[in-house]
Protein backbone atom coordinates (compact mmCIF):
# COMPACT_ATOMS: atom_id res chain seq x y z
CA UNK A 1 0.00 0.00 0.00
CA UNK A 2 2.91 2.37 0.61
CA UNK A 3 4.00 2.10 -3.02
CA UNK A 4 0.63 3.18 -4.43
CA UNK A 5 1.14 6.94 -3.83
CA UNK A 6 4.65 6.73 -5.28
CA UNK A 7 3.36 4.88 -8.34
CA UNK A 8 0.57 7.41 -8.88
CA UNK A 9 3.02 10.30 -8.52
CA UNK A 10 5.44 8.72 -10.97
CA UNK A 11 2.65 8.12 -13.49
CA UNK A 12 1.46 11.72 -13.17
CA UNK A 13 4.99 12.99 -13.68
CA UNK A 14 5.47 10.87 -16.80
CA UNK A 15 2.17 12.08 -18.24
CA UNK A 16 3.02 15.73 -17.63
CA UNK A 17 6.41 15.32 -19.30
CA UNK A 18 4.82 13.62 -22.31
CA UNK A 19 2.28 16.43 -22.72
CA UNK A 20 4.90 19.15 -22.37
CA UNK A 21 7.07 17.63 -25.12
CA UNK A 22 4.31 17.68 -27.75
CA UNK A 23 3.85 21.48 -27.80
CA UNK A 24 7.60 21.98 -28.13
CA UNK A 25 7.77 19.96 -31.34
CA UNK A 26 4.65 21.70 -32.65
CA UNK A 27 6.25 25.03 -31.78
CA UNK A 28 9.39 24.08 -33.70
CA UNK A 29 7.26 23.20 -36.72
CA UNK A 30 5.58 26.60 -36.62
CA UNK A 31 8.93 28.34 -36.16
CA UNK A 32 10.33 26.51 -39.18
CA UNK A 33 7.23 27.49 -41.17
CA UNK A 34 7.85 31.13 -40.24
CA UNK A 35 11.47 30.86 -41.34
CA UNK A 36 10.50 29.18 -44.63
CA UNK A 37 7.88 31.80 -45.42
CA UNK A 38 10.20 34.63 -44.45
CA UNK A 39 12.64 33.43 -47.11
CA UNK A 40 9.85 33.00 -49.68
CA UNK A 41 8.59 36.55 -49.05
CA UNK A 42 12.11 37.97 -49.23
CA UNK A 43 12.64 36.27 -52.60
CA UNK A 44 9.20 37.32 -53.85
CA UNK A 45 9.90 40.95 -52.92
CA UNK A 46 13.24 40.84 -54.73
CA UNK A 47 11.59 39.42 -57.86
CA UNK A 48 8.54 41.70 -57.83
CA UNK A 49 9.96 45.13 -57.03
CA UNK A 50 7.70 46.71 -59.68
CA UNK A 51 4.49 45.31 -58.18
CA UNK A 52 1.76 47.84 -57.42
CA UNK A 53 1.34 46.14 -54.03
CA UNK A 54 5.06 46.13 -53.20
CA UNK A 55 4.86 48.54 -50.23
CA UNK A 56 1.86 46.73 -48.74
CA UNK A 57 3.72 43.42 -49.10
CA UNK A 58 6.76 44.91 -47.33
CA UNK A 59 4.49 45.96 -44.46
CA UNK A 60 2.96 42.47 -44.28
CA UNK A 61 6.47 41.00 -44.21
CA UNK A 62 7.32 43.30 -41.29
CA UNK A 63 4.20 42.19 -39.41
CA UNK A 64 5.04 38.55 -40.11
CA UNK A 65 8.54 39.00 -38.76
CA UNK A 66 7.29 40.72 -35.61
CA UNK A 67 4.65 38.10 -34.86
CA UNK A 68 7.00 35.17 -35.50
CA UNK A 69 9.73 36.77 -33.38
CA UNK A 70 7.28 37.02 -30.49
CA UNK A 71 6.11 33.40 -30.74
CA UNK A 72 2.79 34.24 -32.40
CA UNK A 73 3.53 31.92 -35.30
CA UNK A 74 -0.01 31.57 -36.63
CA UNK A 75 -0.34 35.35 -36.97
CA UNK A 76 3.12 35.62 -38.52
CA UNK A 77 2.37 32.94 -41.09
CA UNK A 78 -0.89 34.70 -41.98
CA UNK A 79 0.95 37.96 -42.64
CA UNK A 80 3.64 36.26 -44.70
CA UNK A 81 0.91 34.54 -46.74
CA UNK A 82 -0.78 37.90 -47.28
CA UNK A 83 2.50 39.39 -48.51
CA UNK A 84 2.82 36.58 -51.03
CA UNK A 85 -0.80 37.03 -52.10
CA UNK A 86 -0.26 40.76 -52.62
CA UNK A 87 2.71 39.99 -54.84
CA UNK A 88 0.77 37.36 -56.79
CA UNK A 89 3.12 34.58 -55.72
CA UNK A 90 1.83 31.18 -54.67
CA UNK A 91 3.03 29.77 -51.40
CA UNK A 92 5.56 26.99 -51.94
Image (cartoon, rainbow, N blue to C red):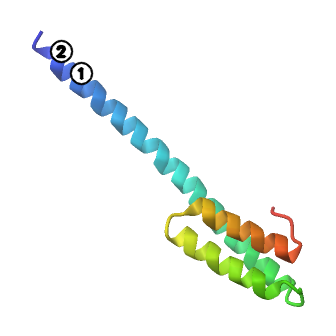
Callout 2: few (<14), some (14-19), or many (20+) C-alpha neighbours within 10 Å? few
Provide residue 10's location: percent of width, then percent of height: 24, 27
Name the foreground residue: 5 vs 54. Answer: 54
Name the foreground residue: 91 vs 63. Answer: 63
On the rendered image, what quadrant is the N terminus found in? top left
- The disc placed on residue 42 is none
**Residue extending farthest top:** 1
**Residue extending farthest bottom:** 50
- Residue 3 sits above or below residue 58 on the image: above
**Residue extending farthest left:** 2
Q: Residue at x 76, y 80 (%)?
A: 57
Callout 1: few (<14), some (14-19), or many (20+) C-alpha neighbours within 10 Å? few
On the rendered image, what quadrant is the C terminus found in? bottom right
Labels 1 and 2 touching (C-beta < 8 A): yes
Q: Residue at x 86, y 83 (%)?
A: 47
Which residue is labeled 1 in the image?
8
Q: Quadrant of residue 32?
A: bottom right
Provide residue 43's location: percent of width, then percent of height: 78, 78
Q: With 35 as the anchor, is 15 left or right in this view? A: left
Which residue is labeled 2 in the image?
4
Q: With 26 as the anchor, is 51 left or right in this view? A: right
Q: With 84 as the anchor, is 27 left or right in this view? A: left
Amino acid sequence: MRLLPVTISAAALCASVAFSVAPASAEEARLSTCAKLQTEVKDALANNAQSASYEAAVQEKTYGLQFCANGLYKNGVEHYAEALRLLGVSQG
